[in-house]
Amino acid sequence: MISLSSDGLSYYAFFGLVLLALGLTRRPFARNGTLLAASWLFYWLWAPRFLGLLLFSTAVDFCCGRALGETDDATRRRLILSSSIVVNLSLLAAFKYLGFFIENTQALLAWWGASVSSDLVDRTLPLGISFFTFQTLGYTVDVYRRRVPAERSFLRFASYVAFFPQLVAGPIERASRLLPQFGRVRKWGDRAIVVGLHTIALGLLQKVVFAGSLGRMVDRVFASPVTNLSPTDVYVTAFAFMAQLYFDLAGYTNVARGSATLLGFDLAHNFRAPFLVTSPGAFWARWHMSVTQWFHDYVYRPLSRGRGALCTPRVATLLCMLATGFWHGAQWTFLAFGAFHGIWLIVDQWQKVRAASRGNPARGATKVGRWLVTMHLLAFSALVFRIPSVVELAEVVDAVFLGEGGGVLSAGQHALGLFGFGLALGVQWVYEKRAGGLVASLAWPLRGTAYAAVVLVYVVFGVSGERGYVYVTF
């Protein structure tokens, strides 16, 4: 197994060879074939055991899409869609959640003196399964809803599913957006090269320097005994982890988008200043947008538009957020994370409706107060997200209010953690103001100097060891 994480040199060696191979081909069919072979090789080098799983998922939804495109019979179409849903969710259940259910079944049976063996359960999570199954399933649902035509070329469809820059951690691309790009003649120009290099450089800076520095501090806190933590340690670490998550996933997304640009493709943006918000709804509209929009379109909407007492917007919101939390992993704390955000969204919407009915919209200092409350609630939910068990979560919360530990972080490290969160705010503000293209607009000598500085920083901070991306584990 060879890690091809995009914060490591091996990824860029592989990417350079792919660019060279594509440069030697001319026809779209040959280029798509080269890119598909490279994407499958990329997955095989990193996760050789599970390449067959990727191929199986691809084949299932390609066949389901073709079958949907060839029939107008409503009953048959529902059966085909149900088959796709069952297969994809069964893959997730078997590889991602089976161990969780067996562990909890064991705990339940222990009360009755019985037991069940979990020795046969393979707990190795297939690389990218949470992303490529959602991408293929979303395609089949869109074909069923007649929002996209069924793809007749297996080469184009397989290339869309396995596109290596975004295969292992997104963004989850809609078929309507990415799939047609594999049918176009792709041309490279100076602008694409500049934008691609700039986006990759930004992603490396975010991941290797910002997320890496914050991650080392966060890991130290969570690796320490809870009794040693001070309330300040926990408070600062919650905000530092928020910033780490942002820089980690935004960094991965930017490297993926930059790589795609250099290959002649355009991937979706995944973040839009998520910390500059005053409500949970606004946060989820700007955070990890490809995943959030997927759950909104394929989980929330069907639930909220169904029939019955349970099919209400509030119930749909709670169930959708529970599913979002559980998508991140098979832990009770991920479910708690989803429940927290679901309840928060419901309460926030109720408050907005109540305020609007009274003609009392938020202004001035009220907006500042709402922002502070929102950030602190997000910080608390970040702790829920990061801590692996409910018992440990309770201990950490206890440390915040009743802890007497001397602390494991120095005052300088506390300052670094808060500075990291402030840096995340600053980066988001700059891009919100559309100033993010500053480097890309510079003349070549200055732009080259900026890129050289990023390479130097990468060599100093990153080559000593890859940390990997947080979302690759999901």
Image (tube, grey):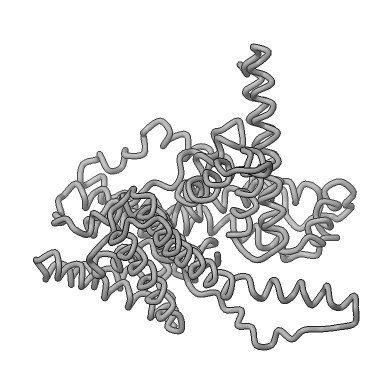
Q: Image check: 199 left or right of 24?
A: right
Which residue shows up at 62% across the image and 64% down it?
Answer: 329
* Up/down of 383 relative to 60, above or below: above
Could you tell me residue 68's position as x and y percent?
A: 34, 60
Residue situated in front as seen by the camera: 289 or 318: 318
Which residue shows up at 41% across the image and 37% down it?
Answer: 431
Q: Image check: 206 left or right of 147?
A: right
For the C terminus, the image quarter is bottom right
Q: Image check: 393 left or right of 110?
A: left
Which residue shows up at 90% across the image and 82% down it?
Answer: 113
Q: Image check: 294 left or right of 24?
A: right
For the N terminus, the image quarter is bottom left
Could you tell me residue 471's position as x and y percent?
A: 52, 61
Which residue shows up at 61% across the image and 37% down it?
Answer: 280
As drawn, the residue found furthest toward the top would be 359
User: Which picture quadrant has residue 353?
Assistant: top right
From this viewpoint, is residue 204 visible? no
Could you tell me residue 311's position as x and y percent?
A: 63, 43
As drawn, the residue found furthest toward the left would be 26
Could you tell me residue 235's position as x and y percent?
A: 73, 46
User: Which picture quadrant has residue 370?
Assistant: top right
Residue situated in front as seen by the camera: 211 or 354: 354
* Up/down of 226 relative to 444, above or below: below
Residue situated in front as seen by the camera: 12 or 386: 386
Q: What is the tally of numbered marks visible in this picture?
A: 0
From this viewpoint, is residue 350 visible? yes
